[in-house]
Image (cartoon, rainbow, N blue to C red):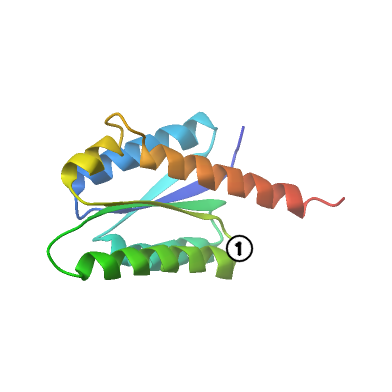
Amino acid sequence: MSADLYAITVARFYEDLAERLESGARAVLEQAGAGVETHAVPGAFELPLAAHYCAESGRYAGVVCLGAVIRGETDHYDFVCAEAASGIARVGLDTGVPCSFGVLTVDNMEQALRRSGGGKRHQGEDAAHAVLAMAGLRRELARPA
């Protein structure tokens, strides 16, 4: 069981998906005994900066980053997905605070619903499990041998 505090940063652009992802992540973290605080941002592009703020605050053992980007008719999808993914990874590498990538990058709403608890898997739950695992590894390696 974890007594640590975790942040969930959630992009609210697709509000229904955001709620599903957040609910799944929160359930996993709370089941592990962790405290949870949620911080909302407008969209997936803003997730890396929110994760950076959370990591730099020193309050959190890890940051779960959640959101959805659905392919449209322009290249916007590619830019947002790439920047969100690389930015979130960079926050974890730069700060040492585990940050998980729970952003749906899908072609349509049907795929998003299936990956947010609608049958295929639950990206919010998966992201929470990932951040718990990495925070555990960080703790384990910080102990004296």
Q: Is residue 73 left or right of residue 116?
A: left
Is residue 30 in sight in this rendering? yes
Q: Position of residue 92 (x, y in %)?
A: 54, 63
Q: Residue furthest right?
A: 145
Q: Which residue is mark 1?
A: 96
Q: Measured along the vertical axis of the image, is residue 107 above or below residue 90?
A: above
Three-letter amino acid code at disc 1?
Gly
Count of marks overlaid on the render:
1
Task: Characterize the local packing of mark 1: few (<14), some (14-19) or many (20 or more) Cα atoms within 10 angstroms.
Answer: some
Q: Residue at point 51% right, 40% down? A: 129
Q: Position of residue 104 (x, y in %)?
A: 31, 50
Q: Measured along the vertical axis of the image, is residue 46 above or below residue 31?
A: below
Q: Position of residue 35 (x, y in %)?
A: 50, 40
Q: Nearer the viewer, residue 14 or 76?
A: 76
Q: Position of residue 136 (x, y in %)?
A: 65, 44
Q: Residue at point 19% right, 47% down? A: 15
Secondary element at image label 1: loop
Q: Measured along the vertical axis of the image, is residue 2 above or below residue 140?
A: above
Locate the N terminus by quadrant.
Answer: top right
Q: Residue at point 18% right, 48% down? A: 108
Q: Residue at point 61% right, 48% down? A: 135
Q: Residue furthest left?
A: 73
